[in-house]
């Protein structure tokens, strides 16, 4: 299925089964804001837990932090956000809609590359080429759309490097990029737009002053560097990790939860000795890829993407991109931030933010390697990867379509569904006993309504990896069936062994080793 077919189904699935609701829906909603529903919050928390375990629990030189959302306004002056945290915006004069100019160009490039791939696959089918064939690769690189995309891309990189807003508009005009809503090509000039939300702190209008909702969680780590260093007894290299909300006044907030104005980040700042940044950048780049693979995202849907234009604080930056239904997009960034942040906060605050190296007998400002992953984007990546429509066997030997979320078992909202075959003969009582036995270790669900086949399908739709069914044989020998979501195979096991069996299937060591 293509994007227009699959993505609306995923969005609809999220609402129908209680993963994500539009925020304030009874008041017609608020653009680009969403509420995580009863199953969504569990999936989200499970992703957080996996990240925290791999980042903090399994690294003795990484500690956690939870800094405030509201910070002293000078923090954002020092970090450069007040002066430089901007996006290039362009208005369509006919539709009165505002767009990010760079996103319009990126989407145009995506369309050209998609046309190139489609034409290549059409030619390959005719010629009998495989994807790794030299002719296939050559045609993919040199057909008309591919060459046009390469030319536009090279010009785009140049205007980004030069911060050339007029040049960015020229690309849009020259390539006749139209307003997605109206089809009009009547564009304004490109202007910079600051993304920070501003509010007032104070009891009265006269006594209040401007503060900002943080646009990133990293600065809370940097301003606490000395406090953590003194109290944690850490030595360089060490890291500070944090999960928290951030806010950006995105003009173009779309593609469901991919780009929102309120979102959550999982970040770790790793403080290192200057001159070792290349080594540690490579280390964390590889470690972060392993994390996503361990959570069940397939290698073919993940790729590194090197930044064409580095941020003002970085000397290296790469993204880990996931292939969403709308193309490869950033999920996590790995950045070598040098000593920019600590130096700036040292300068603006007048406080020393240095590390005394006993081996070299000197003070220095550490360099920083940052790993920053969007929690909402990771959530969406797992939904997109897990959502499948497939044919499944029926009890009468036929076939029917089922929708299944093949989430990693440790990420699934419910781990086990307890399903008595009927609501009589003591089966519900046994089911409740099993539920009470497992609920201390795992989030379970109990369901005795509808036919067993329909209950299986519902658990498939919400991603529950294991269903335990109590039936007439259970009354005779104290055994139950445990059904695997992905294979649909059922295994007969003793109730007394059930807890150990589930524990073996849901052991964090299996994922994190």
Image (cartoon, grey):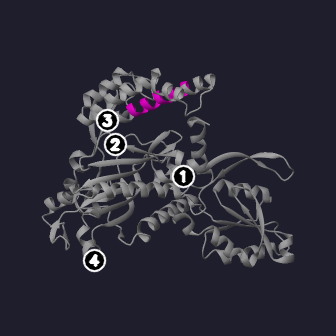
Determine the residue positioned at 49% across, 64% down: 50
What residue is disc 1 on?
297
Indicate the secondary structure of the residue bearing disc 4. Answer: helix
**Residue where numbered disc 4 is placed:** 231
**Looking at the image, is mark 2 or mark 4 nearer the viewer?**
2
Viewer-closest of 260 and 408: 408
Q: Which residue is mark 2?
A: 307
Kindly indicate the quadrant of the structure image that contains residue 133.
top right
Q: Nearer the viewer, residue 294 or 406?
A: 294
**Who is closer to the viewer here, 197 or 46?**
46
Q: Earlier in the sequence, mark 3 or mark 1?
A: 3
Report helix, strand or loop for mark 3.
strand
Q: Residue at x 32, y 31 (%)?
A: 156
Magenta includes 304? no
Marks 3/1: CA–CA distance: 34 Å
Give the image location of residue 232, x and y in percent.
30, 76
* Residue numbers of the magenta segment: 104-119
The residue to which callout 3 is attached is 89
Q: Residues within 10 Å of mark 3 (few under 14, many from 20)?
A: many
Residues marked 3 and 2 touching at CB (< 8 Å): no
Q: Identify whether 460 is placed above or below 132.
A: below
Q: Could you tell which of marks 3 and 2 lies nearer the N-terminus?
A: 3
Q: Residue at x 50, y 63 (%)?
A: 45
Residue 473 at x, y = what percent? 86, 71
Mark 2 crowdedness (10 Å alpha carbons): few <14, some 14-19, many ≥20: some
Among the two numbered marks 4 and 3 on one chain, the one whose residue lies closer to the N terminus: 3
């Amino acid at each position: 299925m293509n994007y227009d077919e699959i993505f609306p189904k995923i969005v609809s699935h999220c609402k129908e089964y209680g993963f994500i609701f539009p925020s304030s829906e009874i008041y017609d909603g608020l653009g680009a804001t969403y509420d995580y529903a009863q199953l969504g919050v569990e999936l989200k928390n499970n992703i957080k837990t996996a990240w925290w375990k791999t980042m903090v629990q399994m690294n003795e030189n990484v500690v956690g932090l939870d800094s405030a959302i509201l910070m002293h306004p000078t923090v954002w002056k020092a970090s450069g956000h007040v002066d430089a945290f901007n996006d290039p915006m362009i208005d369509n004069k006919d539709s009165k809609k505002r767009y990010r100019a760079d996103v319009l160009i990126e989407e145009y490039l995506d369309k050209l590359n998609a046309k190139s791939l489609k034409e290549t696959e059409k030619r390959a089918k005719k010629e009998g080429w495989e994807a790794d064939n030299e002719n296939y690769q050559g045609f993919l690189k040199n057909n008309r759309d591919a060459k046009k995309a390469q030319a536009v891309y090279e010009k785009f990189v140049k205007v980004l490097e030069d911060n050339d807003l007029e040049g960015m508009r020229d690309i849009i005009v020259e390539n006749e990029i139209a307003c997605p809503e109206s089809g009009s090509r009547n564009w304004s000039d490109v202007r910079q737009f600051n993304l920070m939300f501003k509010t007032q702190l104070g009891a009265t209008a006269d006594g209040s002053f401007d503060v900002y909702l943080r646009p990133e969680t990293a600065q809370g780590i940097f301003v606490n560097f000395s406090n953590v260093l003194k109290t944690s007894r850490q030595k360089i290299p060490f890291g500070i990790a944090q999960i928290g909300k951030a806010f950006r006044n995105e003009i173009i907030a779309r593609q469901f939860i991919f780009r929102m104005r309120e979102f959550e980040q999982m970040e770790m700042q790793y403080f290192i000795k200057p001159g070792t940044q290349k080594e540690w950048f490579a280390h964390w780049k590889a470690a972060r890829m392993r994390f996503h693979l361990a959570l069940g995202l397939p290698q073919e849907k993940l790729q590194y993407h090197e930044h064409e234009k580095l941020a003002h604080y970085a000397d290296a930056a790469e993204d880990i991109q996931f292939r969403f239904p709308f193309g490869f997009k950033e999920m996590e960034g790995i950045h070598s931030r040098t000593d920019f942040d600590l130096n700036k906060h040292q300068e603006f605050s007048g406080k020393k933010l240095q590390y005394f190296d006993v081996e070299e007998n000197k003070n220095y400002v550490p360099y920083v390697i940052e790993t920053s992953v969007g929690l909402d984007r990771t959530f969406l990546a797992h939904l997109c990867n897990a959502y499948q429509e497939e044919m499944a066997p029926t009890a009468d030997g036929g076939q029917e379509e089922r929708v299944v979320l093949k989430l990693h078992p440790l990420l699934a909202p419910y781990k086990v569904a307890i399903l008595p075959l009927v609501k009589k003969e003591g089966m519900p009582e046994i089911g409740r006993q099993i539920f009470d036995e497992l609920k201390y270790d795992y989030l379970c669900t109990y369901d005795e309504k509808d036919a067993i086949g329909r209950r299986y399908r519902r658990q498939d739709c919400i991603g529950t990896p294991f269903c335990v069914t109590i039936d007439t044989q259970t009354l005779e020998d104290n055994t139950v069936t445990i059904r695997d979501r992905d294979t649909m195979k059922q295994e007969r096991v003793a109730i007394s062994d059930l807890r150990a069996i589930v524990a073996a299937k849901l052991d964090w060591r299996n994922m994190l080793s």
